[in-house]
Amino acid sequence: MMIKSVSVSPFDDQKPGTSGLRKSVVVFQQPHYLECFVQAIFNSVPGLAGNTLVLGGDGRYHNAEAIQTILRMAAAHGIKKVLVGQYGLLSTPAASAVIRKYQAAGGIILSASHNPGGPDGDFGIKFNSANGGPAVESLTEAMYANSQQLTEYQIIESEPVDINEQGPSQLGEMQIEVIDPVSDYSELMASLFDFDAIRQMFRKGFRIRFDAMHAITGPYAREILERELGAEAGSVINAVPKTDFGGGHPDPNLAHAKELVTEMYSAHAPDMGAASDGDGDRNMILGQHFFVTPSDSLAVLAANATLVPGYASGLAGVARSMPTSQAVDQVAKELGIACYETPTGWKFFGNLMDGGHITLCGEESFGTGSDHVREKDGLWAVLFWLNILAVEGDSIKQIVQQHWSRFGRNYYTRHDYEAVDAERASELMLRLEGKLEYLIGTAPNGLHITAADNFAYTDPVDGSISHKQGLRILFADGARIIYRLSGTGTQGATLRIYVEVYEQAASKQEQDTQQALAPYIQLALELAQVPTYTAMNKPTVIT
Ligand code: G1P
Ligand code: ZN
C-alpha cells in the first residue's frame, strides 16, 4: 500500500496539558490537526515502529473518525500490530491494563475525560507509554517541540477498517486485532478482589446504584457488577455510551451526577452509590445520605487494604497529589509507610509505582488507583469499596466515621472559578505569589501562617524537577489553602482553590464541611482578591 506524505505548516497550539492534548472538537476537526499531533507522537516516541500499539477511546464525538485516521498513520509509520477496542472503545484504565498485559510499546487514548462531548464539546488525545501510564513530561515536551517544526506527516490511503467485529485483520503490512474492551480488564479486577464475598453480599440484598453517565463505564459496569457479581439488573444507570454523553457533563461529582445524588439522599437510597467519568478513570463514592470525599476515600482504602486479596500483603507506600487532603498521610504515619506528595496529574505517580515505592495513590479530583495499572481507575475504586463492605459488614457512613475517630477528620473542599479571563487569572496568581514570602509568620484574620510557597517537586526516581505546581499557604493548625490554575480547561482559565482543615476531636467531626472551613475560605478570597480578579462573587462549582 502506498504511503503518502502530506505537507503541512505546523499548528502552534499542540502543547499537551495535565492529561494529553485537549481541545474543542472544532479545533480537532481542522484539516490535518489530529494528523499533525499523531505524527508528533510517532516522531517523539522511540521504538514504536515494529511494535504493538494499543488504540481506543471513550466513544465521544469524533472518536470513530480519529481511530480510522490513526490506524492509517500507524500503518504508514511501520507499527507491527494495533490492538484496538471494539467500536473504538477502551476506558482509560482498561487501555492501561491492555498495554501492560500484551507488553505493547504504548497506546493512544482518545478522550477529554470529564469534559462534555458532542460537536460543541471537547476532544482529546494522549499517549501512554509501555508501562501503561501517561507520557512523562519530558516526552510530552518533545511532542510539543516536534509539533512546532512539523513539515509533513505520513498516512496510507485505504477504506475504513471494520472495528465493529472482534478479530484479526490487516491494513497494508500492519496487523489489526479488534479486542473485547472489557474482558482483559474484568479478568484483572477478578484477580485483585474477592468476587465471591461481593457476590454473597449482593445475594443477601445489598443494593448499589452505579451511574455510568452515558460514558465509557456502562459496558464495564454492567458486565462486572450485574453479570459477574450479581447486582440486580438495572443497578447500572445511564449505561449506554453516547457520543455526547446524553448532553450531560460526564464528571462524577455532587454537581454533575445529579440523578444519582438525588437518589442517594432519598428515603429509598440503595446501600451504595457510585459514578464514573467520560473515560472511566474517575470515581465518586456515596453511602446512604452520605458523600465520601475522594481524599477520605483514598485514606479509607489505604487503611483497609489488607482486607482485600490483591493488597493482603500490605502497601509499599502511598502518594497523593499536593492539593489532595492530608487524610492519607495520617494513615501512612500509623502504618509506618512512606507517603509522597506529587504535583497534580496522574503522570507523577507512574515513576513511584515503577520504582516500587507506592501501591496506592489518589487525587482530590475523584481519582484513586493502584499499581495494577498506571492510570486512575474508577470501577476499581468501586470494587475496592465493595470488597471492604463485604468483609466489614458496616455501612459506608459507619466505615468513614470510624476512620475519622481513629485518624481524625480532614474537612476539605475545592472551589472552582471557571472560564475566567485568562490574563486576569494569571495576574491573580502572580500577585499572590509575590505576596507569599511576606505572609509567613503573620496571622491574618487570626489564622497563623507558618509557610507559603509555589510548590516544586523533585521526582525521587529520575530526579526531574517540576516547578510552579500551585501556591500553598500552610497554617499552624495543619490547615492549608492552595491555589492553582487548571491544566485541562479549554475556555479561558479555571482557578481552583483548595481548602483543608484537620480536626482530631470526635465531638467536632460532624459539622457541615463548608461551615467548618468558612474562616479559611473567607481568607482565601481576601488574600487573592478573588472576586476582583475573577469578576465572580461565587465559585461555579464546589466539590
Ligand atoms: C484535573 C484535576 C487533576 C486530574 C486531571 C486529569 O486537572 O484537577 O487532579 O489529574 O484533571 O483528570 P486540572 O484541570 O486541575 O489541571
Ligand atoms: Zn477521566
Image (cartoon, rainbow, N blue to C red):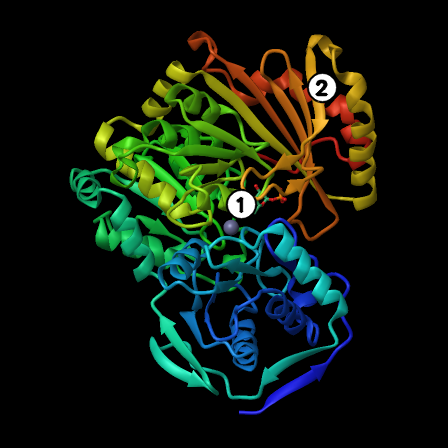
- Mark 1 CB lies closer than 8 A to ligand 1: yes
Q: Is residue 114 visible?
A: yes
Give the residue type at disc 2.
Answer: Leu
- Mark 2 CB lies closer than 8 A to ligand 1: no
**Labels 2 and 1 touching (C-beta < 8 A):** no
Q: Quadrant of residue 450?
A: top right
| Place of residue 99 in the rendered image (x, y in percent of width and height, measured from the top left) | 42, 61
Q: Quadrant of residue 285?
A: top left
Q: Residue furthest bottom?
A: 1
- How far is the residue under mark 2 from the one under mark 1? 30 Å
Question: Foreground residue, 275 or 463?
Answer: 463
Question: Foreground residue, 254 or 329?
Answer: 329
For the point 48% across and 50% down, the residue is: 277
Q: Which residue is mark 1?
A: 346
Q: Is residue 164 left or right of residue 15?
A: left
Position of residue 447 relative to residue 429, above or below, is above
Q: Secondary structure at mark 1?
A: loop
For the point 44% across and 16% down, the residue is: 408
Q: Earlier in the sequence, mark 2 or mark 1?
A: 1
Q: Is residue 225 visible?
A: no
Q: Which residue is mark 2?
A: 523
How many numbered marks does the figure carry?
A: 2
Quarter of the figure with the C terminus: top right
Position of residue 322 relative to residue 489, above or below, is above
Give the residue type at disc 1.
Answer: Trp
| Place of residue 239 in the rendered image (x, y in percent of width and height, measured from the top left) | 38, 56
For the point 23% across and 48% down, the residue is: 232
